[in-house]
Image (cartoon, grey):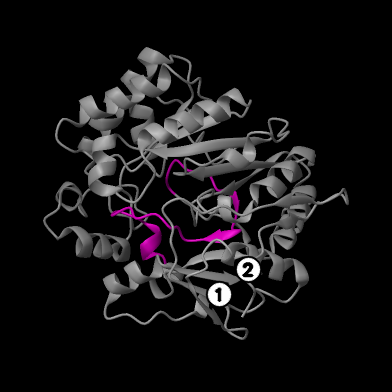
């Protein structure tokens, strides 16, 4: 079993400069009971150092070594899918990810295809509506993952971006929370300088995290854009219980903006709770009067059946979200279940009017939505597809 008294490790430096020491800190709201060392997790001294540093933060966690088991084959004993889901949030898996850089494959909605990458897997937070919980990789092995081969992942981004030969965004947040585990790994302190130096690759990060202390002193050259997922406090209280408070996130957004980072906001999934107009207007006023945003993206629930089944196991079948959804009127036809078109149009129209009142020139876009609906709302072609995950 690895030693657990290591407090500092070195982050690799991509250009051969002196490596920087990093001391792991607890990841807020994450307290794993088990840590699994899967295939590849401790095969080099640097990987062992990373693992030992994180284990020093969780000295009471049970450590299980499975050196022949890939990260996506780690089994968690559970009585049913919901029990598996809850137990998975308390299991941390270290492993290596050999296909961590990919490109999305969306057709028929407002979202453009984009490059994304995964130094982490899944998420330690506990949103009732989590779409990741229904994805194939998470459903059967819903553990929180740290991939130890970050240097290889960044090398693949470098090769991809240079082959493209143009500025291109690489998105961190499609299959995980982009920053929730950063206090443990310090990965941002390697990633942001990498993207700052790169002639083509640009970083886009999506998170619900409120701990961005690792990034504030970095020279990012404007090549990293930070994006937060937000909902009003009343929505968080009911549906996002195990997430950082909204006030904490807004303070962090201000600090990052003051550090010169372009910042973006995603309101998604918008939940039509009673008096939703007031709740969302109050959030937008607080945000838009305190921070100059680079972009804002709006979206509702747009999930697949397996994720909705887990949501209903948590909330009951007669919950507000399920009552608001429809399978009869959920264009675009991409297999996702959404609110009725009329409800989505009313929600977006109201929120866009509020946004324009406070920041009239702010770029606004819809996520995973129907193109004709975006046009009906006055979002011309220049705004369609201008969401948080791209340049």
Q: Position of residue 92 (x, y in %)?
A: 50, 68
Q: Earlier in the sequence, mark 2 or mark 1?
A: 1
Label 2: which secondary element: loop
- In 3D space, how far apart are the residues under numbered discs 2 and 1 (Cα atoms)? 8 Å
Asked whether, in this view, residue 182 is left or right of residue 11, the answer is left
Residue under the point 70% across and 71% down: 48
Pointers 2 and 1 in contact (CB under 8 A)? yes
Nearest the viewer among 24 and 318 is 24
**Residue 380 magenta-drawn?**
no
Q: Compared with residue 73, is residue 7 higher up or lower down, i.e. above or below?
A: above
Q: Compared with residue 18, is residue 50 higher up or lower down, i.e. above or below?
A: below
Q: Position of residue 368 (x, y in %)?
A: 40, 45
Q: Main secondary structure of the magenta part?
A: loop
Residue 224 appears in the picture as rendered: yes
Residue 16 marker = none
Residue for badge 2: 97
Q: Residues within 10 Å of mark 1 (few under 14, many from 20)?
A: many
Quarter of the rendering occupied by the C terminus: top right
Nearest the viewer among 329 and 367 is 367
Q: Write down the region rendered in magenta.
A: 108-135
């Amino acid at each position: 079993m690895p030693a657990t008294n290591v407090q500092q490790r070195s982050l690799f430096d991509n250009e051969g400069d002196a490596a920087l020491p990093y001391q792991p800190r607890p990841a807020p709201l994450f307290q794993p009971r088990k840590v699994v060392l899967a295939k590849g997790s401790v095969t080099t001294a640097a990987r062992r150092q990373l693992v030992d540093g994180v284990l020093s933060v969780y000295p009471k966690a049970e450590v299980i070594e499975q050196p022949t088991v890939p990260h996506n084959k780690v089994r968690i004993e559970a009585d049913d899918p919901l029990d598996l889901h809850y137990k998975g949030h308390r299991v941390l898996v270290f492993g290596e990810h050999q296909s961590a850089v990919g490109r999305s494959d969306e057709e028929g909605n407002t979202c453009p295809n984009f490059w994304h990458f995964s130094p982490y897997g899944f998420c330690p937070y506990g949103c009732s509506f989590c779409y990741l919980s229904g994805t194939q990789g998470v459903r059967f092995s819903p553990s929180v993952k740290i991939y130890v081969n970050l240097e290889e992942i960044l090398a693949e981004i470098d090769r991809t971006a240079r082959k493209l030969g143009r500025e291109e965004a690489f998105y961190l947040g499609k299959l995980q929370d982009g920053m929730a585990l950063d206090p443990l790994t310090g990965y941002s302190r390697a990633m942001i300088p990498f993207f700052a130096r790169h002639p083509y690759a640009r970083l886009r990060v999506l998170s619900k995290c409120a701990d961005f202390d690792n990034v504030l002193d970095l020279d990012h050259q404007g090549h990293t854009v930070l994006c937060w997922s937000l909902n009003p406090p009343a929505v968080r209280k009911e549906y996002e219980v195990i997430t950082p408070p909204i006030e904490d996130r807004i303070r962090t957004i201000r600090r990052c903006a003051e550090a010169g980072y372009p910042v973006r906001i995603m309101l998604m999934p918008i939940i039509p709770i009673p008096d939703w107009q007031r709740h969302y207007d109050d959030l937008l006023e607080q945000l838009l009067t305190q921070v100059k945003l680079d972009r804002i993206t709006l979206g509702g629930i747009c999930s697949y059946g397996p994720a909705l089944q887990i949501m209903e196991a948590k909330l009951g079948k007669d919950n507000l979200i399920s009552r608001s959804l429809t399978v009869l009127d959920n264009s675009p036809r991409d297999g996702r279940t959404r609110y009725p078109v009329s409800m989505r149009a009313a929600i977006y129209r109201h929120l866009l009017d509020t946004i324009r009142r406070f920041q009239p020139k702010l770029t606004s876009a819809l996520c995973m939505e129907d193109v004709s609906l975006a046009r009906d709302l006055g979002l011309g072609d220049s705004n369609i597809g201008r969401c948080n995950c791209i340049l």
